[in-house]
Image (spheres, rainbow, N blue to C red):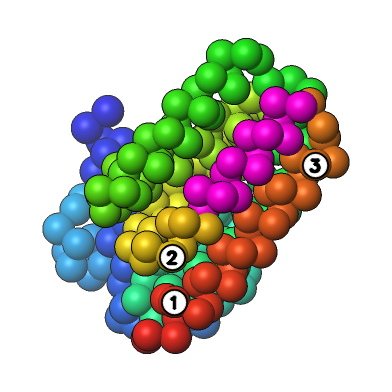
Amino acid sequence: MARASRTQAVVEQVLDAIIDGKLQPGEPLPPEGVLAEDLHVSRLTLREAVRLLQAQGVIVQVPGRRHRVAPVAQWTGIEAVVRHARSAGERKRSSLELLEVRMMIETGAAQLAAERCSASDLDALRELLGRMKTAHAKGDVVTFVAADLEFHDVILRAADNRILVAALLPLTAMLAETRSETSAVAEIREHAIAEHTAIVAALAAGDRIAARDAMAGHMDQTRVDLLEHVHSRR
């Protein structure tokens, strides 16, 4: 476990070095001994980290030469891509990209959940909606965001598709960040409450199309709110 955590720490350090421009895409990595010394790890730990980064498409093996850093567009590992997307220079673009991914995934999840959600799922959604309303009235953004995230998590799990849940798990950190930005605006919280209310009504009715459309409407409004209230201030 200790070695695994050390290796993961090196993976993150190398990714940060790429994001910060210290390691440039297309260029070879520094010699193994130099990089291991710079990162204060053994060569064995570095090799394990490089293998993990190769598996994510971040580092490309070049036969007979030093490995090179791949362009971000060629990365295949979701964790690496998300780490890059969360960097300061990519925040505006990545928040819109994340919303597009949510539109594609969560509308389908709502459609499935309309057929598969249980009475306890609906009770949970109503309780969370009530928590959002109370938090909004108090101006408690932290509690509002927590309830909002849990609301969407209940719907994902109610869709009863393990791959669907796993697909969104790596995006959790980004979801929390973007929700905190938008939910800091009272008007956006009001929009979210109205949209979540419509989603619950559609799920309770077992109406697949209405649930899909309610979630799509929520995503569309979120995009408008993001552009008007958050990105316009940057």
Dot placed on the residue nearer the N-terminal end, 2 or 1: 2
Above or below, comparing residue 218 to residue 63 in the picture: above
Magenta: main secondary structure: helix
Q: Which residues are magenta?
A: 192-205
Q: Which residue shows up at 59% across the image and 22% down it?
A: 122
Q: Pick out the residue farthest to the front.
A: 137
Residue placed most toward the observer, 174 or 152: 152
Q: Which residue shows up at 37% across the image and 86% down it?
A: 234
Above or below, comparing residue 96 to residue 200 in the picture: below
Residue placed most toward the observer, 104 or 179: 179
The kind of residue on which mark 3 rests is Ala
Dot placed on the residue nearer the N-terminal end, 1 or 3: 3
Task: Give the Cα distance between marks 3 and 2.
Answer: 24 Å
Q: Which numbered mark, 3 or 2, is in the foreground of this view?
A: 2
Q: Which residue is mark 2?
A: 187
Q: Taking 100 as reference, is 170 left or right?
A: left
